[in-house]
Amino acid sequence: MNILVILAHPHPASFNHAIAAQTVATLKDHGHTVFFHDLYAEGFDPVLPAAEIPEDGPVPPLIQEHCRELAQADGIVIVHPNWWGQPPAILKGWVDRVFRPGVAYKFAPGEGGEGVPLGLLRARTALVFNTSNTPAQREVQVFRDPLETLWRICIFALCGVQIFQRRTFSVVITSTPEERRMWLAEVDRLVREHFPAGE
């Protein structure tokens, strides 16, 4: 299987980096082909130019590469922190530029963009791993878990991804080394469950 793994955290020593490293290692151990991007390390430009918005707009080679990998992916894993109930801006910009019409979705003939899009993604499974300093109960009761709505409903469901799971690890800032080892073991387990060897 081709699995696309996207990491969005600026600090190389972050737990997000540890999650991404575990994800990539598990996938490779199971014989999968991994397309991996550390958006901050690569200096990804998240700004969507007006010219790129139309489906037939000019797209630079780097964005074409990201679009090709997204289209070829059998599965997707996203790793990022919860910042103000949202992904980091660099990741939102990656979605803006890469989940393009004609790549991730299209509209039915005769529609001009006002209808419900038809998902085009080949990937049938997406995992999102988040870190947070907000306790899970407060995230749901007070903030209504906006990341769940964003990834599950607003992005992946509209683009044809049928199986979705998000796991948030919190509270990270006070977590112990033992807790982090247990969390990484859970990452390994979830990746193996969703992307088994030999598929």
Image (cartoon, grey):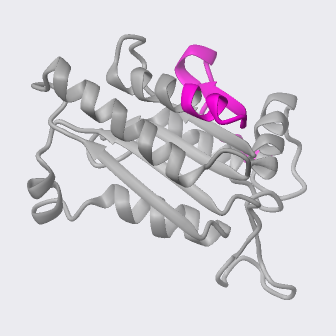
Q: Residue at x 69, y 76 (%)?
A: 117
- Viewer-side residue, 34 vs 146: 34
* Residues in magenta, as a range: 25-51
Q: Is residue 92 visible?
A: no
Q: Is residue 29 magenta?
A: yes
Q: Is residue 131 magenta?
A: no
Q: Quadrant of residue 186?
A: top left
Q: Quadrant of residue 157?
A: bottom right
Q: Residue at x 10, y 61 (%)?
A: 142
Q: Residue at x 74, y 55 (%)?
A: 100
Query: Which residue is outermost to the front?
Result: 198
Q: Is residue 17 visible?
A: yes
- Viewer-side residue, 173 vs 44: 173
Q: Residue at x 66, y 82 (%)?
A: 114
The correct choice, above or below, for 182 with respect to 195 in the image is above
Query: Which residue is outermost to the top?
Result: 13
